[in-house]
Image: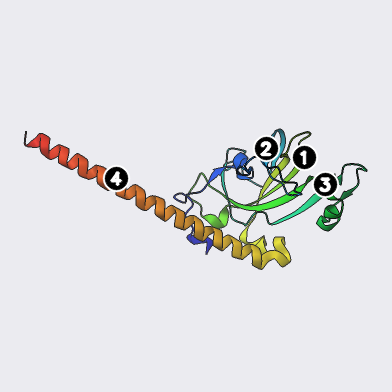
Amino acid sequence: MLNEVDLRELRGFKPLRDLLVFQPGSSGGVHFHTLDVETLRLSEKVSFKATGFDGDSPVDLETHTMSVCRGYVSGMNVFKRIESGEETSDLKTAHLWGRSAYHYGGAREVLALRRPRNHSCASDNLVVVSYGYQKVLLEDEHAITSLSVRPLSVAEFRDHFRSDYPRVAAELIWELRSAHSITADQLIYQAESFRAKAGYFARLSDAITHA
């Protein structure tokens, strides 16, 4: 299936440095207490590592990538209690701590595609992006402090995701379907725009010819 995905024309890729970051929309000035990560940015001092890629096709923070999972595939959250410094990865326990608890940090894993420099297909360009993040002191945001990328072959897909394999495979198909739909809409719009411009220049050419 992945051999049929041509990555050269597919829309939706973005530099790896922008793949994971996000921030919420305006809440009308109202601040909500939450144990979620509301804003995630890339630390200026992020530790980056890419392993398993050959020298002809390196990966760096500018490599164009596309997430092909819903949110993140797996992760571990760390919640901390302000008064005592206690830590837990259990969300229910953090909720029992009330407003003294906050989301300290954690680690997550994302399945993505990279846009290759050659004409290879999607089956050769699956990557696993792993990152660690931490609360920014005195700010309502978290920062990615470590980021690593490695290739994931189709042959090791099932073993890597284990019991999550069916869910991750389904999400991969859903995300590829969405990307192809968006690409088709954009290409149709571009084709119509070029067709209109071609008509304009044809009329201009006729006018000049018969002047």
Circles 1 and 3: CB atoms closer than 8 Å: no
Provide the residue designation for mark 4: 194
Amino acid carrying label 2: it is: Leu
Crowd around label 1: few <14 · some 14–19 · many ≥20 (10 Å) = many
Of tags 2 and 1, the one toward the viewer is 1
Cα–Cα span, label 1 and label 4: 48 Å
Q: Which residue is depicted at the point 71% across and 60% down?
A: 160
Compare marks 2 and 1 and give the one earlier in the sequence. 2
Rendered residue at 73%/49% (across/down) = 36
Distance CA(mark 2)–CA(mark 3): 26 Å
Q: Secondary structure at mark 1?
A: strand
Callout 1–callout 4 Cβ contact below 8 Å: no
Q: In terms of sequence position, does the residue under pointer 4 or pointer 2 come before the other?
A: 2
Give the percent coordinates (x, y) of residue 56: 57, 41
Quote the CA–CA distance across marks 2 and 1: 12 Å
Q: Amino acid at mark 4?
A: Phe
Decide which of 55, 140 is in the foreground and name it: 140
| Residue 188 placement, left or right of 175 | left
Label placed on residue 135: 1
Query: Which element carries disc 3, helix, strand or loop?
Result: helix
> Between residues 189 and 180, which one lies in front from this camera angle?
189
Looking at the rendered structure, the secondary structure element under dot 2 is strand
Where does residue 3 sit, x and y in percent of width and height? 51, 60
Given the image, on which type of amino acid does mark 1 rest?
Answer: Lys
* Circle nearer the N terminus (1, 4): 1
The residue mark sitting in front, 2 or 3, is 3
Q: Tag 2: Cα neighbours inside 10 Å, few (<14), some, or many (≥20)?
A: some
The residue beneath circle 3 is 99
